[in-house]
Image (spheres, rainbow, N blue to C red):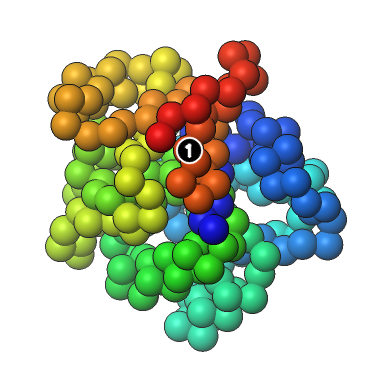
């Protein structure tokens, strides 16, 4: 059964993740992929996400896809208990995942039941297609990317940072442009999308659980 935890800022919803797993986290290892942040000047979320994972008792095994060898990519993605993909530029992330073949391995691991944690760009990348992310990210930072078809691990389109600055207006424009055609799932920085097989829900610290299929 597929299990995904998709957030805008993991540091703000790490307690929800703890409840979502239903597992003892101490002693487990997470493959931590900061690749999306490589072309970005603002990357504070990488450090805050790493600290949140460590605070939960997890061992963080970093994997920089854009510089790692094929053996490193395959070994870490298959060996560790969880996969965590940070925020940053969604297009650069997809470019590097496809270039290295990491996209196929990640999808295989998700389909095999390994828990996937996606933050911002890491959340959008599991949708069928990331063209909608142009409203948030500069696709020119991925000059080798030849298409927008993404992992297609879920049928929905996660849309992070809903109602949060400095992305509030950009997210509203995406909703206006694509809302009628795509099953967008806007989430704020204090919400997370929980995927358990065919059961998809949004959990908010303020408003409790809202089920959306």
How many numbered badges does the structure rendering display?
A: 1
Residue 12 visible to the viewer: yes
Name which residue lies at 70% across and 47% down.
21
Quarter-of-image position of residue 158: top left
Q: Residue furthest bottom?
A: 71
Horizontal and vertical percent position of residue 38: 43, 54
Place of residue 59 in the rendered image (x, y in percent of width and height, measured from the top left): 76, 60
- Which residue position holds label 1? 200
Q: Quadrant of the C terminus?
A: top left
Is 143 situated left or right of 152 in this image? Answer: left
190 vs 32, nearest the viewer: 190
* Residue 161, visible in the rendered structure: no
> Residue at coordinates 54% horizontally, 47% vertically from top-left?
196
Q: Residues within 10 Å of mark 1 (few under 14, many from 20)?
A: some
From what the image shows, is residue 83 above or below residue 117? below
Q: Nearer the viewer, residue 63 or 22?
A: 22
Label 1, secondary structure: give it.
strand
User: Where residue 43 sits: x, y (%)?
Assistant: 50, 42
Compared across the picture, whether 132 is left or right of 98 comes to left
The answer to whether 4 is drawn above or below residue 169 in the figure is below
Measured as percent of width and height from the top left, residue 99 is found at 30, 72
Residue at 22 percent of width and 25 percent of height: 179
State the quadrant of the N terminus. bottom right
Write the residue at 16% across / 58% down. 147
Whether 147 is drawn above or below 176: the answer is below
Q: Is residue 117 above or below residue 107?
A: above
| 28 relative to 212 in the view: left or right | right
């Amino acid at each position: 059964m597929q299990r995904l935890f998709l957030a805008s800022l993991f540091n703000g919803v790490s307690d929800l993740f703890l409840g979502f797993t239903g597992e003892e986290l101490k002693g487990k290892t997470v493959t931590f992929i900061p690749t999306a942040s490589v072309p970005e000047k603002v990357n504070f979320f990488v450090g805050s996400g790493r600290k949140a994972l460590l605070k939960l008792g997890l061992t963080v095994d970093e994997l920089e896809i854009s510089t790692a060898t094929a053996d490193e990519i395959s070994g870490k993605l298959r060996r560790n208990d969880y996969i965590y993909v940070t925020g940053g530029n969604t297009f650069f992330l997809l470019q590097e995942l496809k270039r290295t073949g990491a996209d196929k391995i990640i999808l295989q691991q998700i389909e095999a039941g390994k828990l996937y944690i996606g933050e911002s760009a890491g959340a959008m990348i599991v949708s069928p297609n990331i063209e909608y992310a142009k409203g948030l990210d500069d696709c020119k930072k991925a000059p080798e990317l030849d298409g927008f078809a993404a992992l297609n691990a879920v049928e929905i389109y996660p849309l992070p940072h809903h109602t949060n600055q400095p992305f509030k207006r950009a997210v509203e424009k995406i909703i206006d442009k694509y809302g009628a055609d795509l099953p967008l799932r806007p989430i704020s920085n204090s919400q997370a999308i929980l995927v358990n097989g065919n059961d998809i829900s949004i959990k908010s610290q303020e408003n409790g659980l809202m089920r959306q299929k």
